[in-house]
Image (tube, helix red, strand yellow):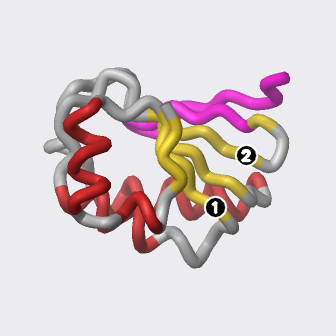
């Protein structure tokens, strides 16, 4: 059951219990994401929603810049779990090469 839906700039947010799902609006490229604003918005969401699991839905994303991956890695101390949802094969491979699949739970 979905409890809440918000939109922050280019982020789409759905709260489902103690899990907050964030997506980038189906954009294929995340090269123009304002990392500072994105981090601030996600941190605020985590605190406001008392999020235990942060899920990042990468549906449609073909390329994820290293800055976005760094942003996600920097959030790992603020929540119990970070999940990466629906990554394309090349994004999944990049996560494995960088060994970020050890930090994040990668789900199809």
| Mark toward the start of the polypeptide (1 vs 2) | 2
In percent of width and height, residue 98 lies at 24, 64
Q: Is residue 107 above or below residue 39?
A: above
Q: Magenta span has 12?
A: yes
Are there few (<14), some (14-19), or many (20+) residues within 10 Å of tag 1? some
Q: Considering only vertical position in the picture, is 51 above or below 30?
A: below
For marks 1 and 2, give the one nearer the viewer: 1
Q: Residue at x 61, y 52 (%)?
A: 54
User: Of 16 and 108, which appears nearest the observer?
Assistant: 108
Q: Identify the residue at image location x=67%, y=28%.
A: 5
Q: Is residue 47 left or right of residue 71?
A: right
Mark 1: secondary structure = strand
Q: Residue at x 32, y 66 (%)?
A: 99
User: Badges 1 and 2: C-beta atoms under 8 Å apart?
Assistant: no
Image position of 31 (left or right of 59): left
Question: Which residue is at 57% across, 78% downward?
Answer: 77
Considering only vertical position in the picture, is 96 above or below 19?
A: below
The residue pinned by badge 2 equals 19
Q: Which mark is residue 81?
A: 1
Measured as percent of width and height from the top left, residue 23 is found at 46, 34
Q: Quadrant of residue 63?
A: top left
Magenta span: predominant SS is strand
* Observer-nearest of 26 and 88: 88
The answer to which quarter of the image holds residue 66 is bottom left
- Position in image of residue 62 (x %, y %): 20, 30
Q: CA distance from mark 1 to mark 2?
A: 9 Å
What is the span of residues highlighted in magenta in the rendered image?
A: 1-15
């Amino acid at each position: 059951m979905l409890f809440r839906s918000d939109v922050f700039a280019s982020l789409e947010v759905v709260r489902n219990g103690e899990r907050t799902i964030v997506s980038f609006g189906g954009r294929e490229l995340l090269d123009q994401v304002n990392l500072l604003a994105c981090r601030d918005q996600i941190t605020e969401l985590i605190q406001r929603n008392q999020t235990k699991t942060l899920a990042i839905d990468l549906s449609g994303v073909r390329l994820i810049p290293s800055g976005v991956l760094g942003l996600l890695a920097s959030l790992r101390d603020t929540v119990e779990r970070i999940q990466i949802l629906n990554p394309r094969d090349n994004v999944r491979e990049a996560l494995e090469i960088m060994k970020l699949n050890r930090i994040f739970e990668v789900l199809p």
